[in-house]
Each structure stands twice: as C-alpha cells, then as structure tokens.
Image (cartoon, grey):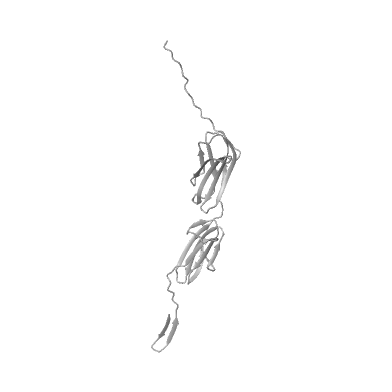
Amino acid sequence: IDITLYDNYNHINHNKRKIIHDNIQPIITAVFSWTTTSITNNGIYNTAIQVEVNDTNFSGLTNNGTPLNGTSFLFNNQGVYTLSATDNAGNATGLSFEIDTTPPSITNIQPSSGAIINTSLLTLSWTTQENTTKIKSQKHYVYSGIILQASGTVQAGITTQTLPNINNGTYKRQIVLEDTAGNITTGEASNIKFTKIPSVFITTPAYEYSTK
C-alpha cells in the first residue's frame, strides 16, 4: 500500500506499507526417511523422520521451542519432537512425534534355563521395564524340540501365564515383546524339565455283603 498525506501547508508524508493477506497455514510434510509414507501426529516410530515445510510466507520452524534454520530437516535421534511452523501472517501449524529405537527389556525369565519344575501346572513369568502404554503386544511360546506346544497373547501389564495342559518333558519357552514403535525383543529360556505332579484319586474299597 502506497500512502501519501498532505496537510494544509502542503507538507507531504509519503509512506509505503506491505500488507500480507494470507490465511493459509504452513504445510508440514513428515515421512519415513526412505519412503513417501506419511507419519501421523503424536505417533511413535523407530526410524528417522524427514520433515519439509512449505509456505510462501514462511517465517520459521521451532522444535520444542528452539528455532531451526531452513525448511528441510532429518530427525534421527531418539526423543520427543514438537514442531511448530509459522509464517509472516501469523498462521501456524504443529506436529508432534516420538522416535524410539530402544527395544523393550525382558529380564528375570522364570522358569530359567535348566530349571526342573515339579508342580501340577507350568507357570511362566518375566519382568519388563517398558511402560505398559508403550507395549503393543506380548506373546508367549512353549516348544518341545521344534514343535510348538503352546502359545498365546498376554495383555500389557500382565507378566505371568499359567499353562494347565503341558505334559512331562523338556521345553524351551519364549517371550516376544513388541512396543508401539515397532521394536521387538525376544526372551528365551531352554532345557526346562517339567515333571507334573500326578493327581491322586482316593476310592472307597468295595465290600461284599452276605445275607447268610
């Protein structure tokens, strides 16, 4: 806008102002670094994320409040990212995601390798430090040699499983834990000898009665 003002004494005030009429928010495009597959807001991933910002009046991008230089970025460090892109008209767009490349932990697997179990039921247990909100799935497997004897899915937060129909023998068991970022950990214990305590049935002896 070019403005020229005159007063009664013919004094002239000439001024120019640039006014931006822009109500379009900046566009943030975020994809897996090796594909064109877009990520979702507040998603958790175990790989690098490529981010592009597109706006004709782009003014800047911040991550967790810290200004970044440029319009193209590759994020590959583990952590939480909160991006905010703004333009010179005051429009803003946000995007948040987390990069998690650490596999879940599985410790204290019981029965442990080489254990001899003399019970009526085979109970499996394990420990994980993974937050239950980040556990996508927990699965257990029991093998006799290479033959799968039992398997199942265990709810997040539960770290025990009792198997009632396992016969006497030597077994290998596995716990497979996957987090929401896609990291997978397998915990294993082998050479577990299971000797089921037999059930004892008490019966009343039969007697012969004579009417003689």
Residue found at the very far front of the displayed protein: 147
Residue 168 sits above or below residue 3 on the image: above
Picture coordinates of residue 167, whole percent (x, y): 54, 34
Q: Which residue is found at the position 54% from the left and 46% from the top? A: 176
- Image quadrant where residue 110 sits: top right
Residue situated in front as seen by the camera: 162 or 69:
162
Question: Farthest left residue?
Answer: 8
Q: In this view, does 90 lie above or below 131?
A: below
Q: Residue 39 location in percent, x, y?
A: 49, 59
Number of dots carrying numbers: 0
Q: Which of 24 and 36 is in front in this view?
A: 36
Residue 118, percent from left and from top = 56, 33
Say which quadrant the C terminus sits in. Answer: top left
In this picture, is 166 found above or below 130?
A: above
Closer to us: 19 or 30: 30
Image quadrant assignment for residue 147: top right
Residue ID at (50%, 45%) = 153
Furthest residue to the bottom?
A: 9
Q: Nearer the viewer, residue 26 or 17?
A: 26
Which image quarter holds the N terminus? bottom left
State whether residue 105 appears in this view. no
The vertical placement of 168 against 93, above or below, is above
Q: In which quarter of the image is residue 189?
A: top right
- Decide if residue 14 is in sight here: yes
Q: Where's residue 190, x and y in %? A: 59, 41
